[in-house]
Image (tube, rainbow, N blue to C red):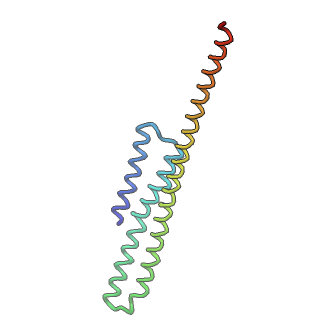
Amino acid sequence: MAFETAGVADGFDEIVAELINNRVDTEELKERLEQGIAEPLKSISGELLPRLEQRLAAAQTAYEASAASAAEPLAAAKAEADGVLKAMQAVLDRMLELESYNELVELLRGIVNDQQQLKEKTQQQQREKLRGLIQP
């Protein structure tokens, strides 16, 4: 799981690099992608998941030795898994927030485009009206 999560983090780093390369990046978007998604995923894959794997291995070893002695290592593994789940949920929430942000940006771009078209039509009508006043 750690390897796959690290791969997803690398994928977001590549997205940021492509945005920069194509010159369509903004500081806010880069920050959201890097600090809100890529860095937390790197932390999860580099720290949280390896600790979870260690806890699970300890729980398995304790269980193999004696089922009665496995309760404490199993509780520690469960607590570690809950921490990983919370961290992953936080990243997912940031992804969903970013999706909403992108939809809002696209909506604003559409509004600006509509406003520009309206402005151009208004100017064209004003020119035609002036021509009508000048020409007999």
Q: Which image quadrant: the N terminus?
A: bottom left
In percent of width and height, residue 103 lies at 52, 48
In percent of width and height, residue 73 lies at 41, 83
**How many labels sit on residues?**
0
Q: Residue at x 38, y 69 (%)?
A: 50
Q: Residue at x 42, y 59 (%)?
A: 42
Q: Is residue 14 above or below residue 6?
A: above
Classify residue 53 as left or right of residue 130: left
Q: Residue at x 68, y 12 (%)?
A: 133
Classify residue 79 as left or right of residue 126: left
Q: Is residue 91 above or below residue 58?
A: above
Outermost residue to the top: 136
In percent of width and height, residue 102 lies at 51, 47
Which residue occupies the foreground of this view, 119 or 71?
A: 119
Q: Is residue 19 above or below residue 72?
A: above
Which residue occupies the foreground of this view, 106 or 65?
A: 106
Classify residue 26 as left or right of residue 122: left
Q: Is residue 78 above or below residue 2?
A: below
Outermost residue to the front: 136
- The quarter holding residue 61 reads bottom left
Classify residue 68 as left or right of residue 83: left
Outermost residue to the right: 133
- The quarter holding residue 46 reads bottom left
